[in-house]
């Protein structure tokens, strides 16, 4: 009789479990859909339940699985001192093991290292007794709305608002540079806020401190950060429906851009800048008082993010891709 071997849950399977669980599917239904035993799903949900939000956390589950694997007695695979120093340095800059692996392999083709080996190095404290490197791993926490709750859609009062549904499809494909997304990060400790702009092709971001979340100051912030670009790199800006975007026509007149707006409460329609906000929040947690943050500090954060390689850019940095775009624009 052939003995069936157990295969560990993959990251993709854990994401499916989280989505199906959030949609209200029962444990037995989730097991049937992804082709797993009910006991496997039940154990996975129980082991990785958030004590705060009463929901399953797939990223926490995947990290804990990697930690258990790394503690299972495997010999360390990361022994190169130069590489170890590189890993530690990049971890402290906010890079994930996957980014570190991809960028190192791009710069040193003859000495490759996998993300899994980096995770083993992080969790093997015998290799770095002085410091706990796990604190530098990105963590994901997301609040959920109570089941059955939905937000009410309010009518937008933004003048001459053009829906993102009318935005040309070629912009979605990111082949042409010069198309931007914007967002605002607010502080609960003061009126101060941070304006965020992201170029869709290169993923370069710009940050600008504003004294308060007003349409006039937000418009000036965008103009200040984008005016130095050649006109070919200032084509469109996609906004959400916040009141700070009311003066978008003034921005268009100054920069020569065209405005588009997401559907109400569809923030994923400008997902690139939303992801960038998540990276900024790692430097400026939610309890940060933006009134005490200087523009110099924001410039430093901006540089660290723009100098961070991205898998979607073939492990190039946004600055490297932007420099190529600028050269073509002149």
Image (tube, rainbow, N blue to C red):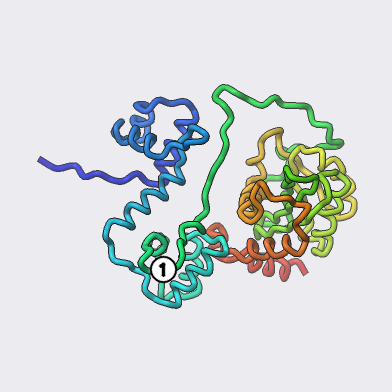
Q: Position of residue 31 (x, y in %)?
A: 34, 31
Q: Position of residue 162 (x, y in %)?
A: 79, 38
Most distant residue in the front direction: 130
Quarter location, residue 44:
top left
Disc count in the image?
Answer: 1
Q: Name the residue rendered at 90%, 47% in the picture.
A: 250
Look at the image and tell me in which quarter the N terminus lies. top left
Q: Position of residue 106 (x, y in %)?
A: 49, 71
Most distant residue in the left direction: 1
38 displayed left or right of 222 = left
Crowding at label 1, few (<14), some or many (≥20) Cα neighbours within 10 Å? some
Please say if 105 is above or below 141: below
Q: Mark 1 sits on what residue?
A: 128
232 displayed left or right of 270 = right
Quarter location, residue 142:
top right
31 displayed left or right of 220 = left
Quarter location, residue 84:
bottom left
Q: Name the residue rendered at 44%, 38% in the picture.
A: 16
Query: Element under label 1?
Result: loop
Q: Between residues 156 and 243, which one lies in front from this camera angle?
A: 243
Q: Position of residue 324 (x, y in %)?
A: 67, 69
Q: Name the residue rendered at 73%, 42% in the picture.
A: 188
Look at the image and tell me in which quarter the C terminus lies. bottom right
188 displayed left or right of 144 = right
Q: Between residues 295 and 156, which one lies in front from this camera angle?
A: 295
Most distant residue in the top direction: 148
Q: Name the residue rendered at 39%, 64% in the picture.
A: 121
Q: Between residues 58 and 160, which one lies in front from this camera angle?
A: 58
């Amino acid at each position: 009789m052939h003995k069936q071997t157990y295969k560990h849950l993959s990251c993709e399977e854990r994401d499916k479990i989280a989505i199906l669980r959030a949609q209200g599917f029962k444990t037995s239904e989730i097991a049937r859909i992804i082709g797993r035993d009910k006991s496997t799903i039940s154990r996975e949900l129980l082991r990785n339940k958030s004590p705060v939000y009463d929901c399953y956390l797939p990223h926490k589950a995947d990290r804990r699985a990697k930690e258990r694997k790394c503690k299972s007695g495997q010999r360390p695979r990361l022994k190169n001192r130069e590489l170890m120093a590189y890993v530690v340095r990049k971890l402290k800059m906010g890079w994930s093991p996957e980014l570190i692996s991809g960028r190192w392999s791009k710069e040193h083709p003859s000495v490759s290292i996998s993300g899994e080996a980096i995770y083993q190095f992080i969790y093997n404290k015998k290799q770095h007794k002085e410091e706990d490197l796990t604190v530098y791993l990105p963590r994901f926490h997301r609040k959920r709305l109570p089941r059955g709750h939905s937000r009410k859609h309010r009518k937008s009062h933004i003048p001459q608002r053009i829906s993102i549904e009318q935005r040309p499809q070629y912009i979605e494909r990111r082949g042409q540079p010069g198309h931007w997304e914007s967002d605002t990060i607010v502080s609960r400790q003061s009126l101060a806020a941070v304006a965020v702009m992201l170029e869709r092709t290169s993923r370069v971001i710009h940050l600008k401190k504003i004294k308060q979340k007003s349409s006039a100051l937000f418009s000036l912030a965008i103009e200040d950060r984008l005016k130095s670009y050649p006109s070919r790199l200032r084509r469109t800006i996609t906004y959400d429906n916040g009141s700070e975007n009311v003066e978008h026509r003034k921005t268009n007149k100054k920069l020569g851009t065209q405005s588009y707006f997401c559907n109400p409460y569809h923030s994923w329609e400008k997902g690139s800048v939303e992801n960038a906000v998540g990276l900024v929040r790692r430097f400026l947690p939610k309890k940060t008082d933006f009134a005490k943050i200087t523009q110099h500090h924001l410039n430093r954060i901006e540089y660290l993010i723009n100098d961070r390689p991205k898998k979607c850019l073939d492990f190039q940095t946004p600055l490297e891709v932007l420099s190529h775009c600028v050269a073509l624009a002149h």
